[in-house]
Image (spheres, rainbow, N blue to C red):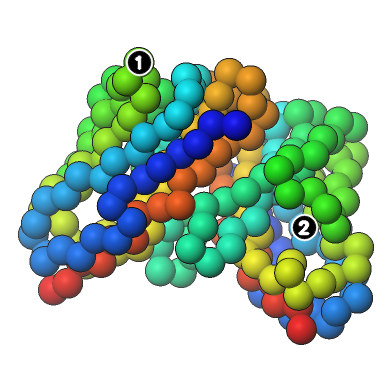
Amino acid sequence: NAGVTQTPKFQVLKTGQSMTLQCAQDMNHEYMSWYRQDPGMGLRLIHYSVGAGITDQGEVPNGYNVSRSTTEDFPLRLLSAAPSQTSVYFCASSPIQFSLNTEAFFGQGTRLTVV
Amino acid sequence: GIQVEQSPPDLILQEGANSTLRCNFSDSVNNLQWFHQNPWGQLINLFYIPSGTKQNGRLSATTVATERYSLLYISSSQTTDSGVYFCAVGGYNNNDMRFGAGTRLTVKP
């Protein structure tokens, strides 16, 4: 039981490049989400999904796309990387959405630098 | 949306000391969780505690949802307790977890 797995752990991109951050969970959780963490701040929600085929925007969605074709996977796509997207990205999963009183589990994070 | 404030922002302790970290939130919540972010950046689940009190070894937490705060107690601190402690809340009308800015704890040997 690996929990929530994110790849890659580190990535350097040039401005304008695109890439996909991978997230997979093996706990059969319906709810998955992506957060970004900037220095000195807590995590902020980018996008979330309440189940396969259903996604929605969070607090800071601009410049990111997501899709959820399976329960297990929830990739995050950067369409055209910008230096402002330099951050640490965390994927999380929980049986149902957090506000309905459940425990959330986080991946190890992806540290992204855009130059 | 719900505002989450954590205090103190920074805390430096000598090994063996006790500490209390506080999390205040601006509205009613249905859920609350405490995390420890270690020096390697990993987020470790400490407590899932929408209400009441829980204990796990040297750590314990109390949430008083009606008064909109939660406390994390660390007793007999160790250098491995160093890192940033976050609380995150879930509101009745939110789809996400709202995080505080964290408390950075440094435990010196």
Q: Position of residue B84 (x, y in %)?
A: 38, 58
Q: Decide: is A42 above or below A111.
A: above
Query: Hey, what amino acid is under mark 1?
Result: Thr
SS at mark 2? strand
Q: The C terminus of chain A lies in which quarter of the figure?
A: bottom right
Residue identifier under label 2: A22
Query: Residue furthest toward the top?
Result: B66
Q: Which of A43 and A102 is in front in this view?
A: A43
Confirm whether residue A51 shows in the render.
yes
Q: Position of residue A36 (x, y in %)?
A: 65, 56
Q: Where is residue B78 in the image (x, y as percent from the top left)?
A: 18, 62
Give me the C-alpha separation between circle 2 and circle 1.
Answer: 39 Å
Name the residue rendered at 64%, 20% in the picture: B93
Name the residue rendered at 85%, 58% in the picture: A63
B109 to the left or right of B8:
left
Query: Hey, what amino acid is under mark 2?
Result: Gln
Q: Decide: is B107 above or below B36.
A: below
